[in-house]
Image: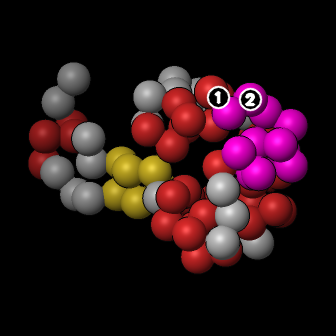
Amino acid sequence: MPVRVTLDRLLDARGMTGKELATRIGISETQLSHFRSGKVRGLRFATLSKMCLVLGCKPGDLLDYEENAGDMDD
């Protein structure tokens, strides 16, 4: 998948665990795990805003994109 979640890199840089982040933003560790693995189908902007506030980042810092010509195919 060309879009990758880079949350683990941010957590490492801030010395924070996924469990701590989940607790601070009010979601379950399972929900956070799904986001971290890229298996989530959607994410509420409110949750994204909380992540950014706690991690001191912008939404784009949580994702990366590797260009792939096949992205235009269904």
Residue, x 51% and y 58% (percent of image)?
Answer: 8
**Of residues 50 and 28, the one drawn nearer to the viewer in this rendering:** 28
- Over which residues does the magenta segment extend? 19-29
Q: Amino acid at mark 2?
A: Ser
Residue, x 83% and y 62% (percent of image)?
Answer: 53
Distance of label 1 from label 2 (alpha carbons):
5 Å
**Farthest residue toward the bottom?**
13
Q: Which residue is mark 2?
A: 28
Residue 5 % position (x, y): 46, 51
Helix, strand or loop at mark 1: helix
49 is within the stretch colored magenta: no
Residue, x 22% and y 57% (percent of image)?
Answer: 67
Residue 25 % position (x, y): 84, 45
53 sits to left or right of 21? right
Residue 23's label in the rendered image is none
53 sits to left or right of 55? right
Q: Amino acid at mark 1?
A: Gln
Residue 44 % position (x, y): 73, 33
Specify the principal SS of the magenta part: helix
Helix, strand or loop at mark 2: loop
Residue 43 % position (x, y): 65, 33
Q: Which residue is mark 1?
A: 31
Residue 64, quarter of picture = bottom left
